[in-house]
Amino acid sequence: MEAFSQKSLLPVLLLFHCLMSYGLANKDTTTSHLQSDQSSLLVFKSKIIDPHNMLKNNWTTATSVCSWVGVTCDKNSSVIELDISDMELAGSIPPEIDNLPLLVSLNMANNNFTGSIPPTIFNNMSRLEFIHLDGNNLSGEIPKEIGHLTILRILSMESQNLTGPIPREIGNMTSLEQLQLTNNSLTSKFRPFQLFTNWFNLFFDVIIALEQV
């Protein structure tokens, strides 16, 4: 009877062990994401000009990154949205922003960011669906690496000092719903069918945007 009980308990003990191991591993992963996201944003903060101390007084290690102004996290405490629009932030965009691999929405609109758009920020953020960089003073060309964002739905870069051609790689964004590139000095014009293999399925706003550049 005792042997039977021990054999009966073995599967239960194994299941309990697996569940505990999974729980600890999941907790370690969540903690790792949280620490990585926090470090990336603190580096980002240190490299920009924050004239009203909106980030300086809020983005600190004294509180969770998920409670910081402009930051939204998912249920696993990973940063998925960053909205620092309309804060009069200035300086160049630090490339460290690309260390937020689970970011879905990036809104840096209506600030005073200058310089070129770091191409590396598009390498590690393949989950991005929304980018708002409009209303800054960014210059240079639109990096061709932006084509890595294949599920992007909204791309807004209007009212800048951007120059050069629209990269053909933008045609990889087959989910685009809004494309805003006006009020720049972009030199090339493409018909939708020259950029998108599925141009006939594009949203009307994207077609109009390409015609107006």
Image: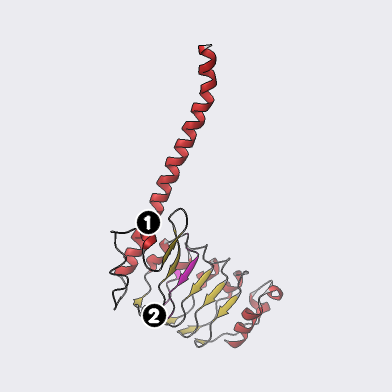
Residue 97 within the magenta-colored segment of the rendering = no
Coordinates of residue 72 in the picture (x, y in percent): 44, 63
CA separation, marks 1 and 2?
Answer: 25 Å
SS at mark 1 in the image? helix
Q: Is residue 212 above or below residue 119?
A: below
Residue 115 within the magenta-colored segment of the rendering = yes
Start and end of the magenta stretch?
102-120
Which residue appears at 31% of the width and 71% of the height?
47
Coordinates of residue 43 in the picture (x, y in percent): 32, 65
Q: Please, what is the three-letter code of the amino acid marked with disc 1?
A: Ser
Residue tagged by mark 1? 36
Coloring basis for residues: secondary structure
Which residue appears at 56% of the width and 69% of the height?
152
SS at mark 2 in the image? loop
**Snapshot quadrant of residue 37:** bottom left
Mark toward the start of the polypeptide (1 vs 2): 1
Which residue appears at 42% of the width and 48% of the height?
29
* In the image: residue 7, left or right of residue 28: right
Q: Please, what is the three-letter code of the amino acid marked with disc 2?
A: Asn
Coordinates of residue 99 in the picture (x, y in percent): 41, 61
Q: Nearer the viewer, residue 168 or 113?
A: 113
Characterize the local packing of mark 2: few (<14), some (14-19) or many (20 or more) Cα atoms within 10 angstroms.
some
